[in-house]
Image (cartoon, helix red, strand yellow):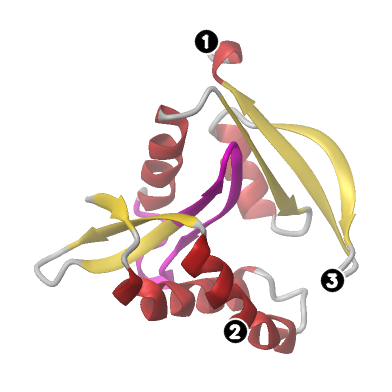
């Protein structure tokens, strides 16, 4: 089930954010993510976040953060990855928008391939000034869908 994040979900969502970033971005010092956790928690509380939960205890398995037509991130709990949750969250995001953009680190090849498989195209290359890492800006447009 997908639903809007509630205030009581913030701790669990922030934990998923940190754990996922540490594992997916081993090319960035882990301290960077840890140092940004408090600021991200504040941003999460103000953002449009949709969580995916399942099971008897309705445990959150992943979430997507949206800012208008920008996907701030899709994060899936490591124990639930490769089970289709990222695609479910992405499809949910696509269902309410005509276009979507996002940024992804070039070295995160798994994510780049996922977004390309889901119809996103690289628009431009850039640099994340905070990490010094190269990233792609990717775009999806409903009108370009077959």
Q: Is residue 22 left or right of residue 64?
A: right
Q: Which residue is more in the foreground, 62 or 115?
A: 62
The answer to whether marks 1 and 2 mark residues whose Cβ atoms lie closer than 8 Å is no
Q: Is residue 26 left or right of residue 143?
A: right
Eye-nearest disc, 1 or 2: 2
Q: Which residue is more in the foreground, 114 or 58?
A: 58
Indicate whether 57 appears above or below 67: below
Question: Crowdedness of circle 3 by 10 Å Cα count: few (<14), some, many (20+)?
Answer: few
SS category of the residue bearing label 2 = helix
Which label number is shown at residue 131?
Answer: 3
Point out the stretch of residues depicted in magenta. 64-83
The answer to whether marks 3 and 1 mark residues whose Cβ atoms lie closer than 8 Å is no
Picture mark count: 3
Percent position of residue 119, x then y: 58, 27
Q: Is residue 132 left or right of residue 104?
A: right
Residue in the image at 41% along x and 35% along y = 91
SS category of the residue bearing label 3 = loop
Percent position of residue 56, x then y: 9, 68
Q: Is residue 48 left or right of residue 35?
A: left
The residue that label 1 is drawn on is 146
Percent position of residue 104, x then y: 71, 52
Q: Which residue is more in the foreground, 118 or 42?
A: 42
Q: Earlier in the sequence, mark 3 or mark 1?
A: 3
The residue that label 2 is drawn on is 38
Q: CA distance from mark 3 to mark 1?
A: 36 Å
């Amino acid at each position: 089930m997908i639903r809007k994040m509630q205030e009581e979900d913030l701790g669990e969502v922030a934990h998923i954010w940190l754990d996922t970033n540490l594992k997916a971005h081993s090319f960035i010092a882990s301290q960077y993510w840890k140092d940004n956790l408090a600021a991200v928690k504040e941003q999460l509380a103000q953002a449009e976040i949709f969580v995916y939960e399942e099971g008897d205890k309705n445990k959150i398995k992943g979430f997507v953060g949206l800012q208008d037509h920008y996907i701030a991130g899709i994060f899936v709990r490591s124990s639930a990855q490769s089970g289709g949750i990222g695609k479910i969250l992405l499809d949910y995001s696509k269902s309410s928008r005509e276009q979507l953009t996002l940024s992804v680190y070039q070295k995160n090849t798994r994510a780049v391939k996922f977004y390309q498989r889901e119809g996103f195209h690289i628009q431009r290359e850039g640099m994340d000034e905070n990490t010094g890492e190269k990233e792609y800006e990717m775009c999806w447009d409903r009108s370009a869908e077959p």
